[in-house]
Amino acid sequence: MSANRVRRLFSGSLIALFFVSVDALESPPVLASCTSGYHYAYESVVVDGAGGWYHPPTCGGPPYYGWVGMDGQISYPSQYPYLGNQNNHSAGWIGIAFSDGGWVQEGWYEGCIGGSCRTRNLGRYTEVMNGSTGFYEFKDWDTAPLAGSSIFLIEYAGSGCWHLYLDYSVLKETYCSLPGSGVPEAVSEVYSGDGSSVSMPVTVYGYSDPNTNNALRIKGASGFVPWTSSLSSGQTGYYDERSGQPAYWFGVFNYNYKVDGYSQ
């Protein structure tokens, strides 16, 4: 049975990773329209001068890797996604991506990823890919309730280590031997290995009040700050596939601390 990672590689050029059996590392998903099967709606931090919208065939903006944390509320879908095949998946997550091709991330999923499968319920997970060593791990922690929400937190702890929290203060994983900074992302993702029209149910990231832990916040040298339209370093880039069939959309309620991803 084939299973895949939750993850994209971005910035307009593909980063080569290796392909291993499904019992170890899975075939790495890569950016949006750049590889068959994966589709996205997301925001991330890009370098100065590259902010704004990207759509196929352009594969996103060049990332800015200078941030050391991210947190925010994820409001789960009110309905289960249509997968077509359980080996496909639909997911919503926040994460930090690294310049070596690795990442840490957490959120919800349904379908099959990294050897874990859920059908007719949503799971909460953490995931790591060490781009230098090739170490990969996906952990399904518990069930995410339809139309519920929780706060996720990812934070650099020093000495190459990153903490991943569920429910804001519940430490679930610490991963080390990773870069000390990366690019924050809020991403809705689907994977269709068989060509099915996998749905991207509405997932909301953040909250309308920027001065809370519920809003999307990113951490720099001065600590956590709301992910607003003006950043101390870098700018915000957006990507979606609104002209596709099905169409995958990214929407902004409050720039950029409350956003959503969905399909039509």
Image: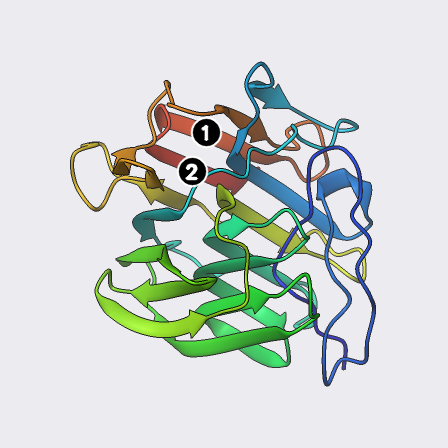
| Image position of 47 with respect to 35: above or below | above
When asked about the image quadrant of residue 198, the answer is bottom right
* Pointer 1 or 2: first along the chain: 1
Label 1: which residue? 251
Q: Nearer the viewer, residue 25 or 180?
A: 180
**What's the distance in space between the residues labelled 1 and 2, CA to CA?**
5 Å
Q: In which quarter of the image is the C terminus?
A: top right
Horizontal and vertical percent position of residue 63: 60, 34
Left or right, residue 85 beside residue 183 = right
Q: How is the image coloured?
A: rainbow
Q: What element carries label 1?
A: strand
Q: Is mark 2 on a helix, strand or loop?
A: strand
When asked about the image quadrant of residue 214, the answer is top left
Q: Can residue 200 be seen from the camera position used here?
A: no
Q: Nearer the viewer, residue 57 or 16?
A: 16
Give the class, few, some or many, for how many residues have Cα within 10 Å of label 2's Cα (few <14, many ≥20): many
Horizontal and vertical percent position of residue 228: 33, 25
Q: Do the residues labelled 1 and 2 touch (CB within 8 Å)?
A: yes
| Residue at 38% across, 59% down | 158
In this view, the residue farthest toward the top is 49
Label 2: which residue? 260
Left or right, residue 194 beside residue 93 = right
Q: Nearer the viewer, residue 51 or 201?
A: 51
Amino acid carrying mark 1 in the image? Gly
In this view, the residue farthest toward the front is 159
Horizontal and vertical percent position of residue 176: 49, 69
